[in-house]
Image (spheres, rainbow, N blue to C red):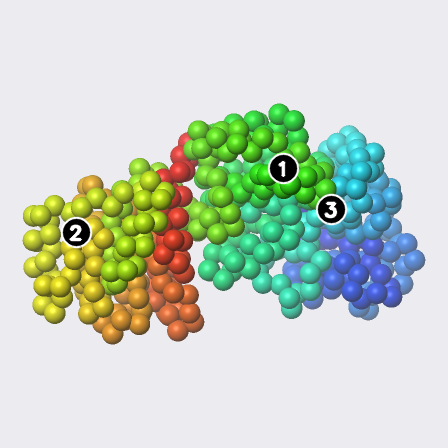
Amino acid sequence: MDFKPLFEPKTMAVVGVSLTNERHPANVIFNKIFLRYPVEVFPVNPRGGTLQGEKVYKRISEIPRGIDLAVIAVRADYVADILTDCIQSGVKGAVLISGGFAEIGRQDLQDRIVAIAREARFPFIGPNCLGIYSPSHVDTFFLPSERMVRPGPGNIALISQSGGVLVDQMVKFANEGVGLSLGVSIGNKALIRELDLLAYLAGDPKTEVIAFYVEGFKKYEGRKFVLAAKTCPKPVVVLKAGKSAAGSRAASSHTASLAGDYAVFSAALSQHGIVEAKNEFELLSFCEALGCYKTAIEGRVGIITGSGGHGVLAVDFCAAHGISAPKLSAAACRKFKQQLSPSIREIAALTNPIDLTGSAIDDDFVTAANILSSDPNIECIIILLLPYSPGITSDVGARLSQIHRKSGKPVVAYVPHLEKYRMLIEGFEFNRVPVSPSIEGAVLMVEAMRRCRPC
C-alpha cells in the first residue's frame, strides 16, 4: 500500500459535512483545510447544496478531480458503502473518523470494512480516530484551529492509539520547541497498525525518531512489533498504557485492544534496546534527546551547575537511573582551577558535579564544558543553567553548544522555560542541543541515550 497520499495529499474529500450544524466534526475539518492548508478540498453530503460557497457533492464519484485522501465522518453503518465508492472512484486512501465499531462491540462492521479495503489494497487510518497531522500538509483533527496547538515541522513521528493523548503530547512538544515529522491517531487500527507505520517511517527521510503510544496489540503482534523495532535503523520510543488490570479493561473499551502482559512486553523492550517511556514526561524528554543524538552511551556524565542544590538533585536523579558522575582526577582539578575566574577560583567545587557558584560568568561555564568534553571518562555533559545569575548572558547557550559541535560529545541543558530566557534557550536549540525545563528532564535525556540501542 502507498501511504504517501495519506500524509501528503494534494486533493481531499470530506464526507459527512452538515448543512445545518457548523460544529459537526466534518465541517470543522472541511473549514480548516479549506482556509488554512494547501490542499484542494471538496465537501460531500448525500443532500448536496453549498458550504462556504462551495458545491457539496452527493457522492465522491461525482467529484470532478482525482482524490488523494477521503476523510469520512458519518455513522458507522454507512462507512462500508462510502469506502466502496472511494475505491471505485480511484481515491488513494482514507481516514475514518467515525466511531461505533469494535470499541462498542460491532466487530462485524469493522471486519467488513477491513475486508473491503484489504481486497482493494486500499489504505485507511482508524476508525474511531482523529487521523493525521502532517505539518505543512494536512490536519484531519476535528478540533477547531483556534484551539489547537501544533508543533512545527521536525524529525519525530508520533503514533498514538488515542487521539487525546496525541493532541496533549503535541501541546507539550510545541511548548518545548520539539517539532514533528508526522502525528497519527490510529484509533481502532483496524487496517493500518503500528507495524505498518514503523515500516513506513523507517524509510521516511523526514523522520529520525519514531514514538508510539500503545494500549495493546493483537495476539502475537507485540512480539512482532518488538522484533521489527529492534531492527529499525532509527530510535524507537514506546509509551505503553494498560499496565494494570483496571488499565487493561479501560484499553479494551477504548479501542478494543488487548493490553497483554505488560511485564513481559516491558522486559522485551529493554532486552532489545527499544526505549520505553514510563510516562508522558519521559516520552517528551526521550524524543527530544534522541532527536538530537543517536549514539548510545553507558551512562557516565559530567555535571556543571551554578547552584550546589541543583547539582545534588541532578546526582540523585542520575543515581536513580543508574547513571554515574565520575570524579575528576586531582591533576585535572588543579589544571581546571587555574583557568577559572579569580572571583570563583577558591570557592568553586571542581569534582563532579562541578559547582561554579552563582558568581560564575559565561567563560567559567565554557571552561568547565571544555574540560569535561576532553575527559575520556565522561560520555555526556549536563549543564544546569540559572539564567538569573548576574554573570550569565543570553549568549552562553550558543557558546556552550559550540563545544558539542567541535567535540561531538552530547550536551543536554536545563534552563527554566520562561519567555524572558528564550534567547538563551534558542542558543542551544538552534544548534540541536536539547533543553529541558526541569533538572529531572535533563537527566532523562541522558537516560534515553543510555537505553537506546539502535541497530
Residue 388 spot, x, y in % from top left: 31, 72
- State the residue position of label 1: 245
Q: Residues within 10 Å of mark 1 (few under 14, many from 20)?
A: few
Looking at the image, residue 375 lies above or below residue 176? above
Label 1: state its secondary structure. helix
- State the residue position of label 2: 351
Q: Is residue 326 left or right of residue 440?
A: left
Residue 440 spot, x, y in % from top left: 38, 53
Location of residue 194 by image quarter: top right
- Front residue of 266 and 294: 266
Q: Residues within 10 Å of mark 3 (few under 14, many from 20)?
A: many
Quick check: can you spot residue 156? no
User: Hey, what amino acid is under mark 2?
Assistant: Thr
User: Hey, what amino acid is under mark 1?
Assistant: Ala
Q: Quadrant of the N terminus?
A: top right
- Which residue lies at the image location 62% right of the left edge and 25% below the top edge? 220
Q: Is residue 40 left or right of residue 315?
A: right
- Front residue of 109 and 233: 109
Who comes first in sequence, dot 3 or dot 2? Answer: 3
Label 2: state its secondary structure. loop
Who comes first in sequence, dot 1 or dot 3? Answer: 3
